[in-house]
Image (cartoon, helix red, strand yellow):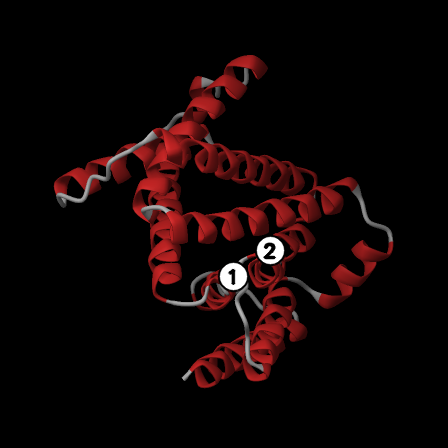
Amino acid sequence: MLGMQLTGTVLYAGALAALGRFPSLSADQLPLALVLAALGLAGLLLFYEALALGPIAIVSPIGAAYVAVTVVLVVVFLGERLSAGQTVAITVTVIGIVVTGTDGRSLAVALSRPKRGVWLAILAMIGFGGWAAVMAYATRTHDGLAMILMQRLVSVLVTVAIVAALRRWPPPSRLGVRAIGIVFATGIFDTLANVFYVVGVQSGFASIVATGSGVYPIIPALLAITVLGERLAPNQYVGVIVLLAGLVGLGVAGA
């Protein structure tokens, strides 16, 4: 997590400087940056611990369901008003996200007797949803690109402090070329996701943008089929169809 935060922040700052878009940072951005860093880091820590405890097939879709939390928060606190068609489309999309992410039978068993990993995943879902809602508010009141940079600077400092306090530095055997490449890729994709989310919120409803951002489970599902030759559970194929139907409906309702 430290490597992802650090590489993403450095590359993002360098890209902004190279494009002549380096934002001005001010003290009035700090309170929101602290809230965003707290929610983002709490969500990541909880989610990674939930993945470690498992079951991963249950933890992952629960984390992806943060979309529902974000939509509720932006509607209640930011005053966004959705039409009946948009509400139905968002609901269908969220259902598709959850169904795509896991085997329905495994989900039913896990939720009937939830383990610690499941509860941590639920807390991570709330943290991610809160982060997306607060970032939507920050984007409406401040420069969104500046808020991303300020939040990431705070997050790096806090993450360094956490790692130092826990003395959890990775052993040299874990710092190979492949591991470093994964860290760089994760930092780049995570930062790009933040940037695209902010740009999307600036041009439209945060509830709709958040819903679109939550459809990422379809990507590993399709890659698992086409690249790894895996066979998904029957409900996951249905979930992909439901998810796509929800996105199409959202586009039609917003037209």
Q: Quadrant of residue 65?
A: bottom right
Asked whether disc 2 touches disc 1, contact meaning CB atoms under 8 Å apart, the reply is yes
Q: Residues within 10 Å of mark 2 (few under 14, many from 20)?
A: many
Q: Which mark is residue 214?
A: 1
**Where does the image place residue 40, in percent across and percent down from the top left?**
52, 40
Q: Residue 248 in the image: x percent, y percent?
A: 47, 82
| Residue 85 visible in the displayed image | yes
Q: Assign a secondary structure to mark 1.
A: loop
Name the residue: 48% across, 84% down.
Answer: 253
Q: Quadrant of the C terminus?
A: bottom left
Question: Does residue 178 show up?
Answer: no
- Picture disc at residue 94: none
Count all numbered tags in the image, as a single digit. Answer: 2
Task: Left or right? Give the position of 113 relative to 83.
Answer: right
Q: Residue at x 33, y 37 (%)?
A: 149
Badge 2 or badge 1: first in the primary sequence: 2
Q: Is residue 73 above or below residue 22?
A: below
Distance of mark 2 from mark 1, alpha carbons?
8 Å
The amino acid type found where label 1 is placed reads Gly
The type of residue carrying mark 2 is Tyr
In which quarter of the view is residue 96 placed?
bottom right
Give how far across and how far down residue 8 sits, in percent.
34, 37
- In this rendering, position of residue 161 left or right of residue 116: left
- Can you say whether 146 is above or below 78 in the image? above
Dot 1 alpha-carbon crowd within 10 angstroms: few under 14, some 14 to 19, many 20 or more: many
- The vertical placement of 175 against 200, above or below, is above
Pick whichever, 224 or 131, lies toward us: 131
Q: Is residue 240 above or below residue 33?
A: below
Whole-percent x, y for residue 95 in the image: 64, 71
Q: Which residue is mark 2?
A: 66
